[in-house]
Amino acid sequence: MSTPHPSPAALPPLPARTPSAPSPRPAAPRPPRRVTGGLRRRSPRRASLAGSLLAALVTAAAVCAGDAAARVFPYGHRHRSVNDLGNQFVPFHAHLWDLLHGRARGGLLLNWQSGYGTSFLPDLGTYLTSPFAPLVALFPRQDIDLAVYVVTVLKTAAAAAAMAWLLRTQARGRWWAAGLLGASYALCGWSVIEASYNPMWLDGLIAFPLLCLTGEWALRGRRFTAAVLVAAVCWTANFYTAYMATLGAALVLLVRLLLQRRPVRQRVGAAARAAGAVLLGIAVSAPVLVPLFLSSRQAYPGWTREFRPAPWADVFARMLPGTYSFSSPALFVGTGTLLLVAALPFHRAVPLRTRLAWSGLTAAVLLSFQWTPAHLAWHLFATPNGSPYRQTFVLAGVAVIAAWAALAHGVPGPRALVASAALLGAAGLAASGSPLATSWGFVLFGGGLALAGAAWWALGRRAARRRLAFPAAALLAVVLAGQAAATTAFGHRGKLGGLDDYPSWGPAHTARAAALAGAEGWPAYRTDPSRPALSGNDPLLLGGEGGAYYSSHTPDVYTRTMVALGAGWTSRGRNVQSIDNPVTDALFAVGARLQPDGTVARSRPLPLLTLRPASPAGPAGISGPAPSYGDGPPFANQELLLGARVYEDPVAPGVCRAGTEAFLWAPEYNATARLADGPAFRLNGNAPRNRAALQPLGPSRGVSSALVLDAPAPPHWALSCLDRGRLDAAVAALRAAAPDPASVRVGSASVSAVLPPGSSGTAVLAAPAIAGWSCNGRPATAYLGLVATPVTPGTRTVACTFRPPGLRPGAAAAAGALLVVAVLGLRRQWTRLSHWRVRRTSAENGWPGPWMRSASKSRRASVS
């Protein structure tokens, strides 16, 4: 039975203090600095900072060394911009540069430069909302490739620093060991091979340790507001990998809670704090996330395939350095880290529960990669296009945390290291049956095992720890950096050999950009970079307001409309190409088009806003049967949208009448075609990935200009002949009924115009009818895939504005979440203020005594 504490009234009064001169005391000699492991002991915060700095430096050095060894940009002549890096990410960062410098067409909500006007907020949230992305504005515009490369290296280094800081937060240990483990996480095979050319995925690499850090704060009951902000930044930067990082962080927190010796109520409370912080953070990012999710549902359907687990020999092979594949998980994290992970089950100094928990979690995450239901859960329940193991960075992070758990209880002894080496040797033997394993990979793996094992053994010897600590740490750093650099270089060789590559900014880019700038006339008319293109997003990269557009959010309505009018595509419909055709140029207000020789072809197109007659089957507007495109050749569809007949059939098979222009439609044709007396043109039809665009063949001179196909004719093709006189007459008639071009006003997300007196019918905006447009205060309709609104007699103006669907609900959710965070913050501050007042009042009354204060400190220390 405990003795009750005496009340303040029962305590004897404190003796009054009389001022007196302090008695001189001899100065105590300063104790010498303690040295641990041969390196100077630092304060916890300074040690954590030093470890993070070391991790960032090792990571940046290894990445740059690997790129230099491969002689890729910016260290050599080889292109670095492979696949989507050059096709999407560099152009989108170029558009961000234009936005930040006030040079872009459009704003945060609408992009006038691509796809003849498309929603930009979803693209911003998918590719450009990383806190690192605005750094591109510090570089010259022509150095956009270098800017993206620097941002990529900085992101990788930041992930290493964040992991090192997390490790030091979870348990105290050698700062340099935390730094090397953090670097091994950031230099994992997934990072240097897959994420290195998908810069937005690297935000997930950073998010995982940061979200785990919010779990540590929840365990300590601290920094709730900071945790909410961290979660919001992570989910805003890249929701896709942030989702995977959140799942991984939840598993790490679960293990941390199971290992805590606390009452169940306290553990449930910590889990609730962590979940609440993440959910509130996601809500704060809702103004970006909700429009992004809705846009994904409205995008043209991409390629889907059934998940097939990788052979286990390939899985073990990917633990080796110097391997390359996008169909198996890149598990490499450095042999020094793998030795600690494999030694954990045999490390007797680590409590059994800890060994079982972290070893079990590492194995469970690995096994989940090969099980279809878990695979779908990792990827938002949809097998992704391309690499099916995009969550591999989570396994790398869990493995590094498990290695730190082993090291936090001391370096594994010789027996544990031998058992670990044997286990890894067996994995290497299993990998020998995989075609992914390489001779250099085995050499690097075996040599790394020997060197890293020797370094850990030296660090485990007490007698030699002080004098061997620095050489051993340096040896571990060299092994890690060397293996990572080799893996980076090997990955470049694989990507350049198997993926499309795109040139970095050079003289061709400069010449095209200058020609487009010289022909600029927006908003009176559009300037199109045309084909052949340097990237899938040339309007963003070079300038102009073209029809090309490549994104994960390419609208379904835009792809189908452009295909009906004759456009080609790549990436199975997500990369829509511009149409080089006078009819579509007139319809989409393209007044200047860049030619392959660098010149600019000019024309007098329709204005952005035109007026079409009312439907004959209904009242004014577009009530009644709506017109629709046919599934055949695009010539009739173009005439339907134009409202006039401008094409004629060949006078003989494959022969257009003299004076007309020949156009070939052969979407599945993959070869060259030409008129007998004209140049050859390449059509790129490789279904279902590629679709050949409507191809102009030039003016016809009659029989001497017969069509020549240099390969067997495809099943579906057609030749039609454009009469320029008819086209000019049709355009002139529509211009006469259109609003005065001087009255058309185009804003960052709006268009308005004054209509001629007595106008009626349908006002049509030369922009795809994506969701979010409203005209004259009501939702816009669609006219053959374009934005439209009915015009009744008496209507004098048309004013259309665009707001991405989901923006208002997302903003409301963010406001509500911020209000909750503010209320909780004020409540905590009020509680602290109340406690401070109680302590001040008690101190004035002489309560509590020194023994009570020391007891309170000990309780706080035990909780933390």
Image (spheres, grey):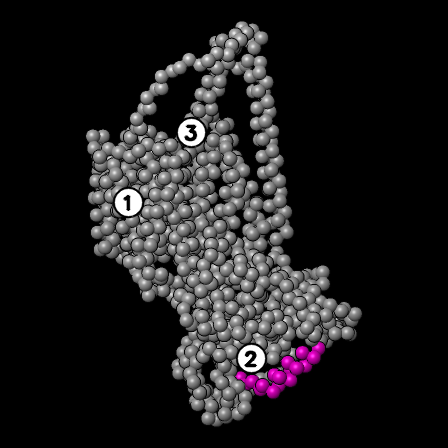
Quickly name the residue at label 1. Answer: 477
Vertical placement of residue 411 versus 156, above or below: above
The local crowd at label 2, few if under 14, some if 14 to 19, many if 20 or more residues have their Cα within 10 Å, is: few
Q: Is residue 730 in the magenta section?
A: yes
How far apart marks 1 and 3 lie (CA) works out to 33 Å
Q: Residue at x 44, y 14 (%)?
A: 22
The local crowd at label 3, few if under 14, some if 14 to 19, many if 20 or more residues have their Cα within 10 Å, is: few
The local crowd at label 1, few if under 14, some if 14 to 19, many if 20 or more residues have their Cα within 10 Å, is: many
Q: Quadrant of residue 743 in the image?
A: bottom right
Region rendered in magenta: 720-737
Q: Position of residue 586 (x, y in %)?
A: 60, 77
> Type of residue at label 1?
Ala
**Dot 1 or dot 3, earlier in sequence:** 3
Q: Is residue 654 visible?
A: yes
Label placed on residue 260: 3
> Type of residue at label 2?
Arg
Evaluate if marks 1 and 2 touch, with contact meaning CB atoms under 8 Å apart. Answer: no
Select label 3 or label 2 by which is in front. Answer: 2
Residue 128 shown left or right of residue 344 in the figure: right
Q: Is residue 805 in the magenta section?
A: no
**Dot 3 or dot 2, earlier in sequence:** 3
Q: Position of residue 783 (x, y in %)?
A: 65, 70
Vertical placement of residue 706 versus 822, above or below: below
Q: Quadrant of the C terminus?
A: top left
**Dot 1 or dot 2, earlier in sequence:** 1
Quickly name the residue at label 2. Answer: 602
Q: Residue at x 62, y 86 (%)?
A: 726
Vertical placement of residue 304 versus 657, above or below: above
Q: Position of residue 688 (x, y in %)?
A: 45, 68
